[in-house]
Image: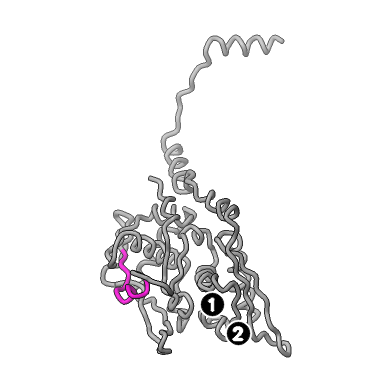
Amino acid sequence: MDFSIEKYLTVAQDNCICQTAYSKNKEKDLTIYQKQLMFLTIARVQKETQTFKIEEITFKEFMDIMDIPVGGNTERKIAECVETLGNKSFVIIEPNGKEKELFWVNPDVTRVDWTEKMIYIQLNRDLEKYLLNLDGNFTSFQLGFVTNFKGKYSFRVYEYLHSYLGLGRLIVKREDALRILGSSRYRHIADFDRYVLKKSVDEINEYSDIDVKYYRRIDRKNITHYFFIIRKKDPEDIEIIQDEWVPRESEYDKIKKDFEQFLNPSTKKEAPNKKEKNNIYESEIL
């Protein structure tokens, strides 16, 4: 079955999440697989319902849609990402200035069925206000624009900067950049530049629908602000990226096919027909 059509699904989030969400400590951070799974779940929910129900996602679906390589202990890592989602949370700053902690999923039903290789996941009901029936102040993008991200922070930087696309430019204080985009993990600005910002912007520019440039304001050898320029890519460039979403034989299917051939090697060799024999014989004489 072709699951690539789901790359055209829309992920929409209230800007309260896109622009203010952060983790208080690294234990609450989402892993790459968890971020991919959350985006996929949000996209599916918004397509078909006005309330959160239990979503069923097979391992194969998840790997195909999010371009996750097959092999090694990938399935084990996927299972672990689901099993630890229940205690993952983030903090937002509401319009009244108050902080609010929100959990991503309902831990009572979010689980993995190893027999069926199935993920059962339900978003936390507290998120309905920020993900459903959105009107006005929200950010949306197609799922496919983030499926090739390999950096942990690329997802967060993308949704944050995309929410300011209408302005075209953005100035962020150093401390805000470290807290919101780096999840407060990187205290040294050089590490933040190297492991968060540069890698994220490179992936955003290569795989997504926006182009980003950034500059640093330095005062007395200290970085005080980041200045971002954000623009929508030309339609032709976006189409080139979307062309890569066209279904091809997945890595999963390739490995499965190779394995089946290994288990059932073909021993029957077809004899060349008479015409082919003559051609071979004649060519040898010549």
Residue 181: image tag = 1
Q: Quadrant of residue 119?
A: bottom left
- Amino acid type at circle 1 is Leu
In-image side of 229 versus 88 (left or right): right
- Amino acid type at circle 2 is Arg
Q: State if disc 1 and disc 2 touch (CB < 8 Å).
A: no
Q: Residues within 10 Å of mark 2 (few under 14, many from 20)?
A: some
Eyeballing the image, is 64 above or below 160?
above
Residue in the picture at 60% in, 80% down: 171
Q: Quick one: SS at disc 2? A: helix
In this orientation, which residue lies closer to the viewer: 249 or 71? 249
Q: What residue would you read off at disc 2?
A: 174
Q: Quick one: SS at disc 1? A: helix
Eyeballing the image, is 171 above or below 135?
below
In magenta, the rendered stretch is 121-131
In this orientation, which residue lies closer to the viewer: 170 or 194? 170
In this orientation, which residue lies closer to the viewer: 266 or 121? 121
The picture places residue 162, in percent across and down from the top left corner, at 52, 69
In this orientation, which residue lies closer to the viewer: 281 or 156? 156
- C-alpha distance separating marks 2 and 1: 10 Å
The picture places residue 256, in percent across and down from the top left corner, at 43, 44
In-image side of 4 versus 46 (left or right): right
Q: Quadrant of residue 283?
A: top right
Mark earlier in primary sequence (2, 1): 2
Secondary structure mainly formed by the magenta segment: helix
Q: Quadrant of residue 165?
A: bottom right
